[in-house]
Amino acid sequence: MGGAERQDSVYNGLQAAREFEQAKVVVVHDGARPLVTPRLIDDAIVNLVECDGVVVGIPAKDTIKLVDDGFVIETPDRSKTWQVQTPQAFLFEPLLRAHEKARAEGFYGTDDSMLMER
């Protein structure tokens, strides 16, 4: 079921989940964070009532720089930056549409929320 890239693996999982008509919510998680708590997963799902996707994260403590061709071009306001992690919870259909659009355009994001933002 895995794919060449993380995004391919998630897409393959979405395709497999299509068999289950009751699949309304998808939670994407990665093996780099094996100690996720059930409460964190539950909180992400519960918060889907207000939107199509929920990500978890922590406020950035380090200064972030946007760089182009080796040169700093901007320093975003750190108070507005977060380090996003998994789990990420989404409504099934919007996530599937986001993946299908990305595949059609040959776009690869760094996480599933990036596909949803497009």
Image (cartoon, rainbow, N blue to C red):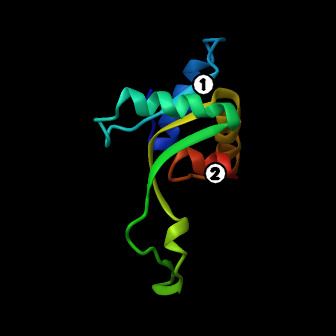
- Is 99 placed above or below 22 here? below
Out of 97 and 55, give the one closest to the viewer: 55
Where in the figure is residue 47, as x and y percent of width and height? 59, 34
At x 62%, y 39%, the residue is 53
Report whether residue 36 is seen.
yes
Amino acid type of the residue that numbered disc 1 sits on in the rendered structure: Val
Query: What secondary structure is marked by label 1?
Result: strand
- Is 70 placed above or below 60 here? below
Amino acid type of the residue that numbered disc 2 sits on in the rendered structure: Gly
Quarter-of-image position of residue 74: bottom right
- Which mark identifies residue 106? 2
At x 66%, y 45%, the residue is 116
Q: Earlier in the sequence, mark 2 or mark 1?
A: 1
> Distance between the Cα atoms at labels 2 and 1?
25 Å
| Within-10-Å neighbours for mark 1: few <14, some 14–19, many 20+ | some
At x 32%, y 41%, the residue is 33
Out of 93 and 11, give the one closest to the viewer: 93
Q: Relative to 17, is 5 on the left or the right?
A: left
Q: Which residue is mark 1?
A: 25
Where in the figure is residue 77, as x and y percent of width and height? 54, 75
